[in-house]
Image: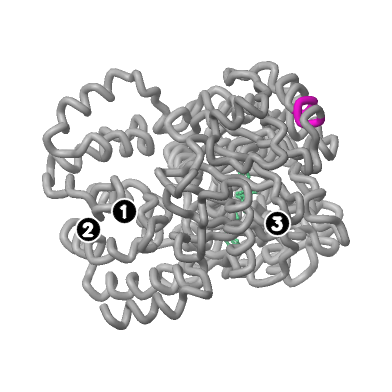
Amino acid sequence: MRDLQALTSLPFDLIVIGGGINGAATARDAALRGLRTILIEKGDFGGGTTSWSSRLLHGGLRYLEYFEFDLVRESLHEREVLLRNAPHLVKPLSLTIPIYRSGSRSYRIVQAGMVLYDLLSYDKSLPNHRMLSRRSTRQLFRAIDADGLAGAAQYYDGQAEHAERLCLENILDAEQAGATVLNYAQVEDIHLSEQRITGLTCRDLLSGDPFEVTIHDRSVVINASGPWVDEVCGLSQSPVSKGRQIGGTKGSHIIVDAFPGAPNSALYVEAKSDGRPFFILPWLSQYLIGTTDEHYTGSLDRVKADDAEIDYLLKETNAVLPAAHLTREDVRFTYAGVRPLPYAEGKKTGSITRAHILHDHSQEGAKNLISLIGGKLTTHRQVGEEFVNAAFRQRGEAVPTCPTHQRPLPGAMLLDDPRVGEWRDRYRHRIAPTSLSHLIAIYGARTGDLLALIDRHPALAQPIVDYAPDIQAQIVFAVQAELAHTFVDILRHRTTVAMHHTYGFAALPVVAQVLQEYCGWSENLCDRNIRAYHQFMSTNCIPDYALGQESASLQTA
Ligand SMILES: Cc1cc2nc3c(=O)[nH]c(=O)nc-3n(C[C@H](O)[C@H](O)[C@H](O)COP(=O)(O)OP(=O)(O)OC[C@H]3O[C@@H](n4cnc5c(N)ncnc54)[C@H](O)[C@@H]3O)c2cc1C
């Protein structure tokens, strides 16, 4: 149990509300630049929009059509910084855009966009684009619909298969640099006096106990709560914001196993029915397909891909890859999130800017509050830098140099690192080669700490389930070294076991047994977690059309 009462007397300089990728990057930067920092997250770190994204670190080719050259340039620059500072988590990804004569963008238009994209990423380490003829496209993608095909464009972006872990490593680095980082702690009330925030009433959602965070004269509060920004502003008795800031749009994904005609690399396709672009992405030996983009005003805590969105993604994938014949039966997992976009009355969803805005509330009733409107996964480091610069200025202090441009994340390591060979030699009789490669790909330089658990407890080398490469040591590591508190944290955010064909249900008895044996969890706590896990999956991930089947199979079990 945590005791958060002591926090009341601590003098924090920077208080970050929200532990998604942008809050995490801000807390990391602030702590590294010497600000006494606390980050407060009501769920798990990265469990909000960050965990529901398409996981691409991209310039945003599409934004060129809206002349957002600054945004594209900034994103391409940040893509490069991430490839350098987090090479274990961010990998180059080859994407192909098939071009059809009936499509809304001609071969020449796409080519012009590609040239511009290359120009705006003049300092990149990734290869330039190449245009493919119809013949070469068909040779490379034999299953692609050939009717009206004019050719294709190929280019590179970045992919973070484990976007949640990118967030977590920012959190761990922030903590290492001295920040206090709390998950399952919700801000419930914002206290104002003379147009300054003077305190926050929070609740420890693990114990149910309230606690206070005192805000001092020069403390700055950062509202990095993503789509919840307006909700957080509304926690104050007197107004801190003039009207609505966020106009979220919902995006849904489906995950399917490899299917007939599945491409070896990623496709970026224009939907036949409405011309919207969507991705078919190879992802952890499966395919991640998405997204949709719809105005959204529902609950932010319960967002789910609806049946119509799932059918749309299946139909459009079958249209471009006719051999796929994907049906609802093929869907292994679904997820949806709300993009925290700026409120733009009456605008088409695709045309709303994806650029971020730091909204200073000085003129609206809270002199020490700044909110983030928008912000992509790709640009989180830049957002952190801008927030911390703004905080120093607001405190009337000189702005120290930002360290995150050059500083690698804690797990940063290249695959030719000599430690990789040592781990392979040492553990080859205990861990399957695919599992070891998987561990190195997600933990990077921290793999050694994880493997040390196996030296002490050899049984933890066993797999969690037979369909995923994860091993039982990861369960203990998640709790002991990665701030996980629930089964959802372990199976959905620290590992990806949840996102396979059984929604991770098969792993639940193993997780319970390991936590009871190695981490002192009671049977009662594990049972409560199992129920909460089923609730989470039903609320967020299992399609409505499949919910009856899932509860029937549970009753049988
Ligand atoms: C479908 C979809 C696909 C996307 N794909 C991409 C992509 O491929 N590439 C890309 O760059 N971007 C992508 N994005 C955008 C990107 O994912 C988000 O902009 C980004 O993750 C937002 O991060 P954040 O930290 O600002 O918000 P979040 O991750 O939502 O974090 C905010 C946090 O605040 C917490 N919070 C809320 N209220 C409180 C409170 N009262 N007290 C404490 N904590 C609170 C929430 O629990 C949440 O965890 C996509 C977004 C969506 C929805």
Q: Is residue 487 left or right of residue 136?
A: left
Q: Earlier in the sequence, mark 2 or mark 1?
A: 1
Depth check, front residue: 182 or 399: 182
| Kind of residue sitting beneath label 1 | Val
Mark 2 residue element: loop
Where does label 2 land, which residue?
Answer: 519
Q: Earlier in the sequence, mark 3 or mark 1?
A: 3
Residue name at image x 77 percent, y 60 percent: 247
Question: Residue 224: x, y in percent?
Answer: 64, 52
Where does label 1 land, which residue?
Answer: 479
How far apart, in angstroms, are the residues tagged by discs 2 and 1? 8 Å
| Kind of residue sitting beneath label 3 | Asp
Work out whether 87 lies above or below 367.
above
Q: Is residue 549 left or right of residue 423?
A: right
Residue name at image x 63 percent, y 27 percent: 135
| Kind of residue sitting beneath label 2 | Cys
Q: Is residue 31 left or right of residue 332?
A: right
- Image: magenta residue range: 109-113
Question: Residue 179: x, y in percent?
Answer: 49, 44
Where does label 3 land, which residue?
Answer: 293
Q: Are marks 2 and 1 in contact (CB under 8 Å)?
A: yes
Residue name at image x 51 percent, y 57 percent: 326
Front of the two marks 3 and 2: 3
